[in-house]
Amino acid sequence: MSSYSATGIVLSRTLLGDNDRIITVYTKEYGKVSAVAKGARKAGSRLSGATELFTSARLLMAKGRSLDVVSQCEITESFQVLRHDLELMARATYLCELLDHTTVAHDHTACDRLYDLLMGALYLLQRAKSYPDGVVHAFELHLLAELGYAPVLEECIRCGERIEEGSASISVLQGGLLCREHRHVVRDAELLTGEALLLLLQLRDQEADTILHLSPNPRITAEIARMLRRYISVRIDRPLKSIAFLDEIRHTGA
């Protein structure tokens, strides 16, 4: 079997037999790859830590007939801050699952940018204090843009008319804002407050340090969270398991 090296982040893992794991890794070089980590569940295994969710590692993998095999690993970042904070862990798990469900295996398209996007979001989550969902929503918006699904937030999706500041309408199905005329002819048009639109633009356009210092009104954060949830749900093929956990964490404020 030929071997190759890659730097990747563990997006998901499943059990295989008594001692092994199958991991899905998003790599900077090859995109999404699934591989068997033999003996990863044994006590003291050198592969154990490297197969934990959202761990970043340098991996040496051997090509197999159906699944590749992890033969060596070196952890580069374990994100311990995220593992010891339930709120942050829930968000990190969601980010990994979202990237997993919106990409296909061995697609090299923008793989280096998507890897950097996820790594950057995980690092930012470790520093997020007042508004960790700001990191989540910024990741969602940038991921949608990389995948070609970015919502149009400056002009009417139907006629191109520039949307002035203030409340607007948005169509999740059509992919963006609607002017006064066309908001009445689109079935799923719903109100988007001016504050919510401004926050979306900030999360999309501002530098990371600016996003970390945002402290928006909870009513506005809930509004954009609902909108982005609906927007993403119509563009992926199945529901995300991590959403229920994240919603519970948000509700309890754990």
Image: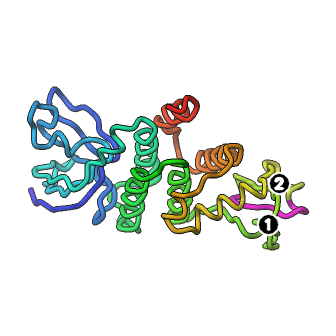
Is 142 displayed left or right of 88 in the figure?
Answer: right
Q: Is residue 47 left or right of residue 222?
A: left
Q: Position of residue 241 (x, y in %)?
A: 47, 35
Q: Is residue 167 above or below residue 55?
A: below
Q: Which residue is mark 2?
A: 186
Residue at position x 36%, y 58% from top? 119
Query: Toward the viewer: 109 or 250?
Result: 250
User: In the rendered view, would you say 107 is above or below 22?
Assistant: below
Q: In terms of image quadrants, where is residue 199?
A: bottom right
Inspect the magenta stretch and tell me whether residue 180 lies in it. yes
Q: Residue at x 13, y 54 (%)?
A: 62
Q: Residue 198, position in %: x, y? A: 70, 61
Q: What's the amino acid at mark 2?
A: Val
Tell me the magenta residue range: 174-182
CA–CA distance between discs 2 and 1? Answer: 9 Å
Residue that badge 1 annotates = 158
Q: In the image, what residue occupies the spot 42% across and 62% down?
A: 117
Is residue 228 or residue 64 the one in the foreground?
228
Q: Which amino acid, mark 1?
A: Arg
Confirm or deny contact between disc 2 and disc 1 (CB under 8 A). Answer: yes
